[in-house]
Amino acid sequence: MSHVTTLFDQIVEDIGDAGQQLTTLAACEGSAGNISVFVTSLTCPLEPIDELELPSPALSLGGGWVVITASGRRLRDVSRRPALSLVALHIDDSGRMATMHAAPGVRPSSEWNSHLAIHNDQRERRGVEYHVVLHAQPLRLVFLSHLPDINTTEELNERLMRWEPETAVVASQGVELAAFQVPGSPSQMQATVAALARSSAVVWAKHGIVTRSDTSATQAADLVEYLEAAAYYEVMNLGMGSPAHGLESDERNAVAQAFGLGV
């Protein structure tokens, strides 16, 4: 029988499972990577310890909650030590301040500005009541973003979508590519919000990937896993001198027609 009894427990279990999944994928070395969940209401067992000014106004999140992994903590530890690995932010009605619920000394991820801005944009655009943002650093996807001949979203998608039909199905909106920005910077935040308004995944060039989901952290992690598998094919092909060309145009078109997609 599941031990999950509350929404907070459900969120902890989901983030913990995603953290383990990303660890197995070698996509969150050390304390790399972060995950957050927005919900409209929450009963939080963590104590309120501080009032924080948000890095930028999040008017559409007013009154809601964001549970986010903590700075300097490992995603693989969330399941075992949730109180030391997570921060819960209760956004005030103005969308400018939050009450932080956490253990003493625990702070939100340094990239919390991007998380909050993405949640805010998605809630403003689509009225989401449950929304997940996940950042990871899968090796092969990051490697591809270093290549001099992959500079645009179109070039990245061509290299990823040609290997498995399943990639086009699970990433039907494609994958955005955002130019390198300093981690945690306002420019990174702005580029990520814009990219995730068009897709469910964006590769931060020379850094990592951000995915989002309306369902769960594990679904957001699944998307990372699918895209990293596609990147693995591409890297293997490069290492062998590029003998393979992937799916032919007619094969990709057949997949698109069968699943109602644009490939």
Image (cartoon, rainbow, N blue to C red):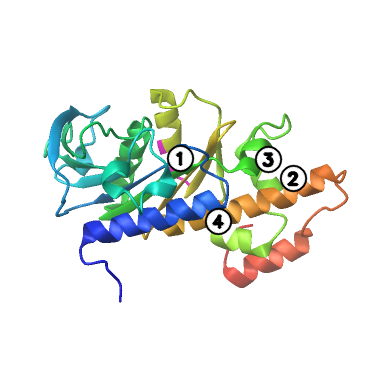
Distance from Cα at disc 3 to Cα at disc 1: 25 Å
What's the residue type where badge 2 is placed? Val
State yes or no: residue 194 in magenta.
yes
Q: In this picture, which residue range is highlighted in magenta?
A: 193-199
Q: Which mark is residue 155?
A: 3
Quarter of the image where one finds residue 191: top left
Q: Who's the residue at 66% across and 36% down the image?
A: 143
Q: Who's the residue at 33% across and 31% down the image?
A: 113
In-image side of 147 versus 153 (left or right):
right
What's the residue type where badge 1 is placed? Gly
Q: Which mark is residue 171?
A: 4
What's the residue type where badge 4 is placed? Ala
SS at circle 1: loop
In-image side of 181 versus 58 (left or right):
right
Distance from Cα at disc 4 to Cα at disc 2: 19 Å
Residue highlighted by disc 2: 235
Q: Image height check: is 168 above or below 143?
A: below
Nearest the viewer among 188 and 216 is 216
Q: Residues within 10 Å of mark 3 (few under 14, many from 20)?
A: few
SS at circle 3: helix
Q: Who's the residue at 58% across and 43% down the image?
A: 138
